Amino acid sequence: MDRLKSSARLMIVSDLDHTMVDHHDPENTSILRFNALWEAHYRHDSLLVFSTGRSPTLYKQLRKEKPMITPDIAIMSVGTEITYGKSMEPDDGWVQFLNQKWDKDVVIEETSKFPELSRQAETEQRPHKVSFYVKKEKAEQVTEALNKVLKGRGLDVKIIYSGGIDLDILPQGAGKGQALAYLLKKFEAEGKRPVNTLVCGDSGNDAELFSIPEVHGVMVSNAQEELLQWYAANAKNNPKILHASERCAAGIIQAIGHFKLGTNISPRDVSDLTKDIENAHPAHEVVNFNLLLEKWRRAEVENTELFLAGLKAVSHPTGVFIHPSGTESHIKDHLNILRKVYGDSQGKPLKIWVDDVSASQIGSDTWLLKFDKWELYGEERQGCVVTAVMSTKESNWFTWLHVHQTFLEQSAKQEWLF
Ligand code: GLC
Ligand code: MG
């Protein structure tokens, strides 16, 4: 991970299902709040790690279903697969390490003798993870018996029960906690151990995350019984672990505030964004600007004239906007078009979010920005890559000088506005 030149200010290591992602929230309110907070205030100097039980196949599927931003590191298949960046470059060193005292064929052979176990989908069977479903009342007894049998066959395995249904068999050195410990050791060796680390989870396979020394941890309000039981037995007196009163990503945001790890005010929680233009960082302006567009198109703006004046104030007099279709216009003229589309998404569930915002200073008062921008209409989404130039030359705040958009592959189904 060489995106950051020095230690991350905050590293968040979060589980996905029922932690970062709330499957009972069709509006995606809390994850969108988290996304805006992360891109505006943390992306530039912090690290986001997703740690999921899902295989790469199901992880990619979830990314299509939910408005998720791109993590710096993805740990998948219960800490048995680690990849870096957008391109998901695998960590081969980790794979080598997991081969110790592991033989998948023996695990398959022995588990087939247990009628209580039913095998999960093929996508979820991975080189260092064999997964089943087993009923709650059988879980303990099966785990014990399996441990004994596999030990007898010379293997050193770890058996984890999650969500009151899933049973995973992994090499002893694997798991979400071990994968995190491995990453921390790597950062340490580079002299870049994060200043703070916050782990976030809801179920059994997340328990290990909370036993890594020195990390802060949040169990979201909706955490499973098996995690709460683990906590009661092993970590009750650890002041660095919080059982949040809020669900999923809202619980993560709550924990950032509780442990004082940095700001936890998401731009989505700011009632008047037009008054919030004197920002400390251009990424913050990117997030605010796109949120304002969302509000406009949802007809959620109280004083429309003041609002347009606010948008004008952040666009440079000669600023140019290049639409994904290739059409070029002045940003100011383009803002006039906005008048016509006020509330065009009223009643429709339009959400706009930005992902992977990067900003580099290319002059004393000039910044080059790059990010992905997504629009979600219920189930349908479209996105584009945006490169932009911002300046603080003629004002105290960031103004848009140049915006160039290109559709992302999966896109271009609906009309794209701005
Ligand atoms: C995810 C995986 C599954 C695993 C479970 C618990 O749901 O898809 O294979 O058993 O997480 O770790
Ligand atoms: Mg979970």
Image: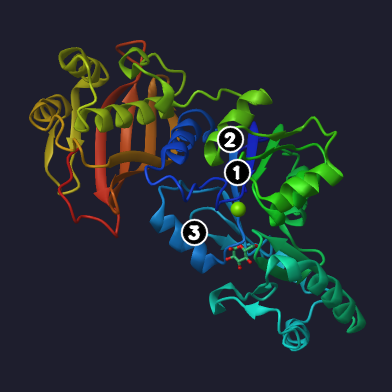
Q: Residue at x 46, y 18 (%)?
A: 280
Residue identified by numbered label 2:
251
Note whether residue 101 is visible: no
Q: Amino acid at mark 1?
A: Asn
Determine which quarter of the picture holds residue 371. top left
Q: Amino acid at mark 3?
A: Ser
Residue identified by numbered label 1:
222
Q: Residue at x 31, y 39 (%)?
A: 352
189 w.r.t. 269: above or below:
below
Indicate if the residue with disc 3 has its beta carbon within 8 Å of ligand 1. Answer: no
Determine contact: label 1, label 2, CB under 8 Å: yes
Dot 2: what SS? Answer: helix
Residue 200: x, y in percent?
A: 65, 43
Q: Of the residues tagged 1 and 2, which is closer to the observer? A: 1
Indicate if the residue with disc 1 has its beta carbon within 8 Å of ligand 2. Answer: no
Label 1 vs label 2: CA separation?
9 Å
